[in-house]
Image (tube, grey):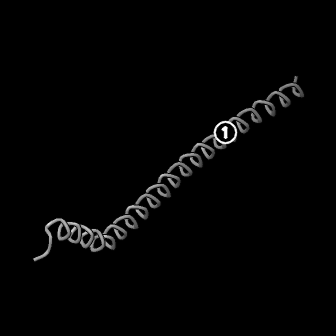
Amino acid sequence: MSDPVSQSVSEATLLTVGMSSANAAANLINTANTALCLSLMNAVANQQAGNMTRQTSAVQANTGIMSTGSAVQSAVVEKIL
């Protein structure tokens, strides 16, 4: 029979070696999940920023159209008077 201490150390080493591939796979999956999550968060942030820019452009366009109408009306009224 072998020494119990040697047997315990041997079993612990065998367990560590046996679990290394499973731990590596779990770390790889975790890293892939984190990268995917960050890319989706960036996509949402970019979409929100784009929506804000489009809304601002629409407001400025409407303001320009409304002020141009007033300017044209003022010019026409001045020529009539």
Disc 1, SS: helix
Vertical relation: 79 (above or below) 47: above
Across and down, in percent, residue 13 comes to: 27, 69
Quarter of the image containing the C terminus?
top right
Instruction: Give the residue furthest to the left.
Output: 1
- Residue 81 or residue 37, whichever sits in front: 37
Give me the residue at 14% from left, 75% from top: 2
Picture quadrant where residue 25 is located: bottom left
Across and down, in percent, residue 57 comes to: 66, 43
Across and down, in percent, residue 72 comes to: 81, 34
Q: Is residue 14 left or right of residue 41?
A: left
Give me the residue at 47% from left, 60% from top: 35
Across and down, in percent, residue 37 comes to: 43, 56
Q: Is residue 58 left or right of residue 74?
A: left
- Residue 71 or residue 17, whichever sits in front: 17
Give me the residue at 58% from left, 43% from top: 52
Vertical relation: 22 (above or below) 75: below
Question: Would you name the residue on which mark 1 appears?
Answer: 62
Vertical relation: 69 (above or below) 32: above
Is disc 1 surrounded by few (<14), some (14 to 19) or many (20+) residues within 10 Å?
few
Q: Is residue 28 left or right of residue 6?
A: right
| Identity, as a three-letter code, of the amino acid under mark 1 | Asn
Picture quadrant where residue 61 is located: top right
